[in-house]
């Protein structure tokens, strides 16, 4: 006597809305359980998923059923129709292979069954291929419909902020002005084009007046820039790489749009060209964000110029952080004042000192010796500073650290700061131990 077939009831609908489905998942399960009871079929398990079968291998529940059939957990599939199993050649091939291997004994649908029989397998492939053909034709029809809508001047997508979608018939949707929000969008362009406002300034203004989207949310900074760069507002739109003239009413002129684009263009910054050695030394005490720096040139009373470097909160964590600026010279003074409380990586520091000594000896042997021979120097010996590494001590290390902080180049300071293990915070122009 043959072993009874263990069926897995598989119900599926694609990810489209319920009203576009021929049958919901609950209805499929109900109908097929009644069929199983009527025909005395053993349903070992019920599995369902909401996923399109257009692409091969993309349905997790279906893939698990295939694995369970290969392991012998199921020997049959119960489903509403063949197109519930497959609408692509890849998944169809897996099913037919399992039938050929005698691992899948039977597929039972509401109106017919498929077993290891040439005619039934051929019919299964025909029905699933027909489902794939319908999918492909539907895709072509949708794309053709979208192109036709674009050619008529209507953008086939959700209307941008300041506009609303208006459905006049079941398959005809137009775009009209959102009378509540459109005036603010127009003001956004005028503020940028005529007053030079930045995106952040626009966001502060919109948040201050309580501007909200149709979903009752504040307009994000990225959405503000997206809006300001969208040519839809002067009457043009792009779809699938093709530009169209819109039938919708423009909110602004192209002249105003172009003027706003020029205001938003900024010269590209040359990142990491300038070395600010103290950026990695500390963090902002108020918001916990990183520290950045910038050059400031001040014109003096008698016409000359003086350059200062200022460090301050980068405001990546909190754009409104109130921590004040601090001069690099003041930062160095405070760091030197804390020199006895600083933990130093002595191995790294000793390597830096050795490199400095080596450089000094090279200079002494190549330059000073020549100057001495030329009679420009009376003596080239300098006993005031002992360069013998055998007598290296923490005191000498700290003296060298202070020397570089006071007189070193930006690169030398950056290298020496990498040997400091102590972390600091910056609060109200004061350097504090973290």
Image (cartoon, rainbow, N blue to C red):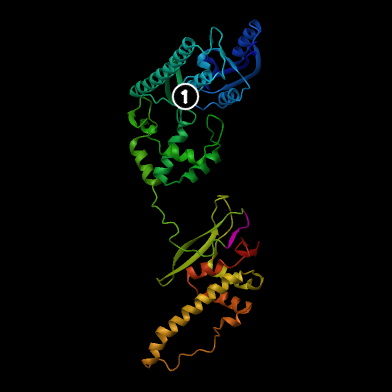
**Residue 198 drawn in magenta:** no
Name the residue located 66 percent from the left edge and 17 percent from the top edge: 44
| Residue 181, position as x, y percentages in the image | 48, 31
Residue lying farthest to the top in this orientation: 38
| Residue 374, position as x, y percentages in the image | 36, 91
**Foreground pick, 247 / 19:** 19
For the question of whether residue 427 can be seen, the reply is no
Residue underneath mark 1: 90
**Could you tell me which quadrant the N terminus lies in?**
top right
Name the residue located 35 percent from the left edge and 35 percent from the top edge: 253
Report the magenta residues as a range: 281-286
Residue lying farthest to the front in this orientation: 1
Q: Secondary structure at mark 1?
A: helix
Seen in the picture, residue 35 relative to 146 is either above or below; the reply is above
**Could you tell me which quadrant the C terminus lies in?**
bottom right
Seen in the picture, residue 21 relative to 272 is either above or below; the reply is above
**Foreground pick, 300 / 368:** 368
> In the picture provided, is 356 more to the left or to the right than 429?
left
> In the picture provided, is 39 more to the left or to the right than 257?
right
| Residue 88, position as x, y percentages in the image | 46, 21
| Residue 256, position as x, y percentages in the image | 36, 39
For the question of whether residue 221 can be seen, the reply is yes
What is the quadrant of residue 325 in the picture?
bottom right
């Amino acid at each position: 006597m043959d072993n009874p077939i263990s069926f897995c009831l598989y119900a599926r609908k694609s990810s489209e809305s319920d009203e576009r489905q021929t049958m919901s998942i609950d209805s499929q399960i109900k109908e097929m359980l009644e069929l199983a009871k009527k025909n005395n079929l053993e349903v070992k398990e019920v599995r369902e998923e909401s996923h399109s079968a257009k692409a091969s291998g993309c349905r997790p529940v279906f893939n698990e059923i295939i694995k369970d059939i290969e392991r012998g957990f199921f020997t049959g599939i119960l489903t509403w129709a063949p197109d519930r199993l497959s609408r692509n050649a890849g998944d169809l091939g897996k099913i037919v292979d399992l039938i050929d291997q005698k691992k899948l004994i039977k597929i039972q649908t509401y109106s017919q069954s498929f077993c290891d029989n040439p005619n039934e397998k051929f019919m299964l492939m025909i029905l699933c291929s027909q489902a794939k053909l319908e999918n492909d034709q539907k895709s072509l029809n949708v794309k053709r419909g979208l192109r036709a809508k674009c050619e008529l001047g209507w953008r086939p997508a959700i209307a941008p902020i300041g506009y609303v979608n208006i459905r006049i018939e079941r398959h005809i949707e137009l775009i009209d002005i959102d009378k509540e929000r459109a005036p603010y969008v127009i003001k956004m362009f005028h503020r940028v084009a005529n007053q030079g406002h930045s995106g952040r300034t626009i966001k502060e203004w919109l948040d201050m007046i309580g501007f909200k989207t149709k979903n009752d949310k504040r307009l994000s900074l990225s959405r503000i820039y997206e809006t300001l760069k969208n040519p839809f507002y002067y009457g043009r739109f792009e779809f699938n790489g093709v530009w169209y003239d819109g039938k919708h009413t423009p909110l602004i002129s192209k002249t105003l749009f172009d003027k706003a684009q020029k205001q938003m263009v900024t010269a590209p910054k040359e990142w990491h060209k300038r070395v600010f050695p103290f950026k990695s030394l500390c963090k902002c005490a108020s918001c916990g964000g990183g520290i950045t720096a910038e050059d400031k040139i001040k014109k003096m009373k008698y016409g000359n110029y003086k350059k200062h470097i200022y460090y301050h909160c980068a405001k990546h964590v909190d754009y409104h952080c109130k921590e004040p600026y601090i001069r690099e010279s003041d930062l160095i003074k405070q760091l030197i004042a804390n020199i006895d409380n600083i933990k130093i990586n002595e191995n790294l520091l000793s390597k830096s000192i050795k490199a400095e000594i080596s450089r000094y000896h090279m200079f002494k042997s190549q330059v000073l010796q020549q100057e001495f021979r030329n009679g420009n120097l009376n003596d080239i010996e300098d006993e005031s500073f002992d360069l013998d590494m055998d007598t290296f001590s923490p005191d000498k290390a700290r003296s060298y650290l202070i020397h570089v902080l006071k007189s070193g180049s930006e690169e030398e300071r950056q290298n020496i700061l990498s040997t400091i293990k102590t972390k600091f915070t910056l609060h109200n122009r004061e350097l504090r131990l973290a």
